[in-house]
Amino acid sequence: MPPLLLIGCGKMGGAMLAGWLEQGLPPETVVVEPYAEAVSAFAGRVRHVASIAEIPADFAPAAVILATKPQEAPNALPQLARFVASAPVFVSIMAGKTVAGMQALLGGEAARVVRAMPNTPAAVRQGFTVGFAGPGVTAGQKALADQLLRAVGDAAWVDDEALIDPVTAVSGGGPAYVFLLVEVMAAAGVAQGLPADLAMRMARATVAGSGALLAASPQDAATLRKNVTSPKGTTERALAVLMDEAAWPDIMKKAIAAATARSRELAG
Ligand SMILES: NC(=O)C1=CN([C@@H]2O[C@H](COP(=O)(O)OP(=O)(O)OC[C@H]3O[C@@H](n4cnc5c(N)ncnc54)[C@H](OP(=O)(O)O)[C@@H]3O)[C@@H](O)[C@H]2O)C=CC1
Ligand SMILES: O=C(O)[C@@H]1CCC=N1
């Protein structure tokens, strides 16, 4: 793996950096992160600077990973325009930010940009990332981006950049919906008289165990659901409530549509 330049070492950038280090990331890598505590776990294994202005002048990374918040892009990207001359691949994980928008902030169409959307299971190398390679990205650069994304889980590529907005809504934010499921299942158990700590332990173990079963099983989700649902049993009653068109199917469509719309808004 070549030395990289990572801009932003927060929750996602830090999770990806940990995965790259496992794959042999060289210590010449530079991490720009204003919050020193965020990089303390990586001390001695990468070069840390607090701002883009402090990146060594002669550093020419093969890839620049953009992992700051989308709102920081108008400040950070123009400061990185000097790297475009040495033709690295810029790999952005920022929600909403389009390839054309990032190229404009980086000084023009010469910037080679991959737009990618990972998710936080990357922290346990079980992330899922979808990427889109913008104009000018070479096959070798796409392969390097793919290697970086697969260091923290599975990855897929799309040829239509517009799909990254619903990807952001489904898999980017998806872990949050699953964690919310734990919270509301536990609260519903408490409403039926369960002690709060037992309800939370059960909800957490049930979601984690179901995820592990789903990952390990060759069966699809619908079959695994049916395996739980005894005819005329208890699960059937619960699913009649949840699977009503106005319940989860409609609610989830609305939630994904709202997140997709927000991703499009963040482009601006
Ligand atoms: N969290 C998630 O589940 C996912 C997030 N993303 C995307 O990843 C990006 C980062 O999100 P997340 O990790 O959650 O956010 P974090 O706030 O945890 O990380 C962003 C980091 O960037 C730092 N930072 C701010 N300005 C600069 C700068 N100019 N140069 C370098 N670093 C800077 C921040 O420091 P400080 O806090 O001091 O400002 C912070 O530590 C976002 O664009 C988001 O859309 C994508 C997929 C999933
Ligand atoms: O909520 C967000 O905007 C980011 C993108 C996907 C997950 N977190």
Image (tube, rainbow, N blue to C red):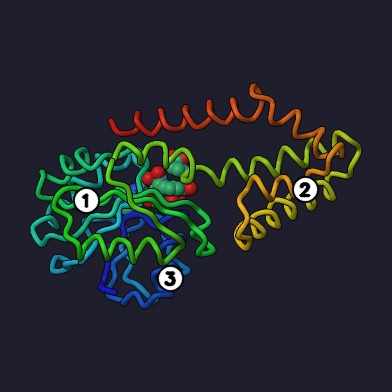
Residue at image mark 1: 113
Between 78 and 236, the one nearer to me in the picture: 236
Quarter of the figure that contains the N terminus:
bottom left
Asked if residue 111 is positioned above or below residue 192 in the image, the reply reads below
Between 21 and 189, the one nearer to me in the picture: 189
Residue at mark 3 to residue at mark 1: CA–CA distance: 26 Å
- For the residue marked with disc 3, what is the amino acid? Phe
- Dot 3: element: helix
Q: Residue at x 32, y 62 (%)?
A: 146
> Residue 42 got which mark?
3
Which residue is the extreme one toward the right?
Answer: 193
Asked if residue 177 is positioned above or below residue 6 in the image, the reply reads above
- For the residue marked with disc 1, what is the amino acid? Val
- Dot 2: element: helix
Q: Position of residue 10 (x, y in %)?
A: 43, 54
Q: Quick one: label 1 or label 2, which is nearer the N terminus?
A: 1
Q: Position of residue 216 (x, y in %)?
A: 62, 63
Q: Quick one: label 3 or label 2, which is nearer the N terminus?
A: 3
Q: Quick one: label 3 or label 1, which is nearer the N terminus?
A: 3
Q: Residues within 10 Å of mark 1 (few under 14, many from 20)?
A: many
Which residue is the extreme one toward the front?
Answer: 231
> Residue 228 got which mark?
2
Tag 3 and tag 2, C-beta contact below 8 Å: no
Tell which tag, 3 or 1, sits nearer the viewer: 1
Q: Residue at x 52, y 61 (%)?
A: 126
